[in-house]
Amino acid sequence: MASSTTATTGPPIQVLVVDNDPAHAEAMADSLSRVGYQCVVAGSGPEGVEQLERGGFEIVVSDLKMPGVGGLELLEKSKELLPDAQVVLVTGHGTVESAVEAMRQGAFNYLLKPLDLKQLRAVVDNAARSQHLRRANTELARRLDEKFGFESIIGNSQPVRELIDRLRRIAPTDATVLIQGETGTGKELVAQAIHQNSPRKNRPFVGLNCAALSENILESELFGHIRGAFTDAAHDRVGKFEYADGGTLFLDEVGDMPLPTQIKLLRVLESGEITRVGSNEPVRVNVRILSATNRDLETAIAAGAFREDLYHRLKVISVRLPRLVERREDIPLLIDYFVRMHATRHKKQVKSVSAAARRRLLAYEWPGNVRQLKNAIESMVVVDYDGVLDLDDLPPDLAPKQEADGSPMDSGASMAELVGKSMSDLEALFIGETLKVTAGNREEAAKMLGIGERTLYRKIKEYGLN
Ligand SMILES: Nc1ncnc2c1ncn2[C@@H]1O[C@H](COP(=O)(O)OP(=O)(O)OP(=O)(O)O)[C@@H](O)[C@H]1O
Ligand SMILES: [Mg+2]
């Protein structure tokens, strides 16, 4: 933390100065204004209350003894109206006890009369420092919200807009949600976003991967165990359910949970109580369950590998995430997002992504969905040396065979077949193909074609491409 108020950024701190002695009030306000505070003076207790009601103050400096409304009442009012504001009281010799009482009621500090202006500034500077810290914390919390809020789900396609719309309605409830989707489609991201946009957001979000663990370990992870429950249990251990109390438990890869554990989980969901392994004492827990799987649970049920009753419990609400190729028009947004992310992370300058590389990224099938795209971009950013992400930066599994040797089309018509067509036919064909690759996104298509958007519109009309 910087040691001086001037070293910290943000708007200046507003100070309310309350004193029924006008000369004294002015002296204090003047002294504080000179070092960068924005002061408002109130000449009486009631006037001070009026100013508090108007709001905006982060620090209040008030005389303790005033006719009508005194410093203690003002402190109380301030705690009520502006709970984040710090209050400093100024007191004469006879009233030190009241000042001590004020501290007990949450005043930041007190100063003795006759007032030493240097001391006033020192105390106000301290209060300001604590306010800057609070501002920074609020900012941090806001940024975390942003990170895990719906803003973190990048995409503007119809499926993503519908998804976010649904999440907005689901998140604030306590409903159990089953998130389904292929690998890398963002199931965990969505689970975090649901939690972060729920009233439980200040309580823990606890994830557990059900696929990676054996039955015994999984159960002890979920429900905890008591000392001596099994050979290695040297101590009592709290399970994820208890750990997540008041918050959200995310059961990842729930489709891979062993059948006996499924039965126990179902019992917990029905009773709202867990029992630690080795214990007989049930413990009540208040946990919201989110689960995810990339398996087709209906098939697993048919095969006897997943319990139907548990399936219905988990899937009170179900969310299905689209494959990346079902929302190709989001690929350009995701490319830019990941380029920025990884350029920052790896401290690299990336000026642009070449049209040819974009074309390839847009046309690819993405079996690993967003995760694969994210990793591909990361690898491109890392191997790039000239600031332009191009075909030569593509990871091997994406490297196109034909484009690399300079042929303008990577599939479909060969050059020989095109000979004999007119330039305008070729242009129409080319624009049509590009629009297919960008899933109809004209802005992106214009960028790839190296022409203005207006020109593209004109040509689309001219060639009747729609
Ligand atoms: N719409 C999106 N916007 C931004 N990032 C995304 C999006 N979808 C996924 N990601 C990112 O892609 C990566 C994979 O996402 P996530 O781990 O949530 O996938 P998953 O569905 O849980 O995959 P798996 O089934 O393999 O566990 C993460 O880094 C995530 O942040
Ligand atoms: Mg996952």
Image: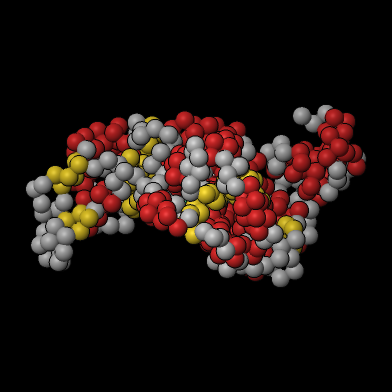
Q: Quadrant of residue 235?
A: bottom left
Apparent side of residue 157 relative to residue 371 in the rendered image (left or right): right
x, y (%) of residue 209? 34, 53
How has the structure been colored for display?
A: secondary structure
On screen, 286 above or below 23? above
Q: Nearer the viewer, residue 375 or 428?
A: 375
Picture quarter with the C terminus: top right
Residue at x 44%, y 52% (from the top left corner): 107
Residue 303 can be seen, yes or no: no
On screen, 465 above or below 335? above
Apparent side of residue 433 relative to residue 128 in the rendered image (left or right): right
x, y (%) of residue 141? 50, 50
Apparent side of residue 301 relative to residue 440 in the rendered image (left or right): left
Picture quarter with the N terminus: bottom right
Number of numbered discs overlaid on the protein picture: 0
On screen, 155 above or below 352? above
Q: Nearer the viewer, residue 446 or 161?
A: 161
Apparent side of residue 99 relative to residue 302 in the rendered image (left or right): right
Residue 408 can be seen, yes or no: yes
Q: Nearer the viewer, residue 35 or 381?
A: 35
Residue at x 62%, y 38% (from the top left corner): 156
Q: Quadrant of residue 124?
A: bottom right
x, y (%) of residue 395? 61, 63
x, y (%) of residue 9? 64, 58
Q: Nearer the viewer, residue 177 or 389?
A: 177
Residue at x 10%, y 51% (from the top left corner): 279
Residue at x 81%, y 50% (from the top left corner): 415
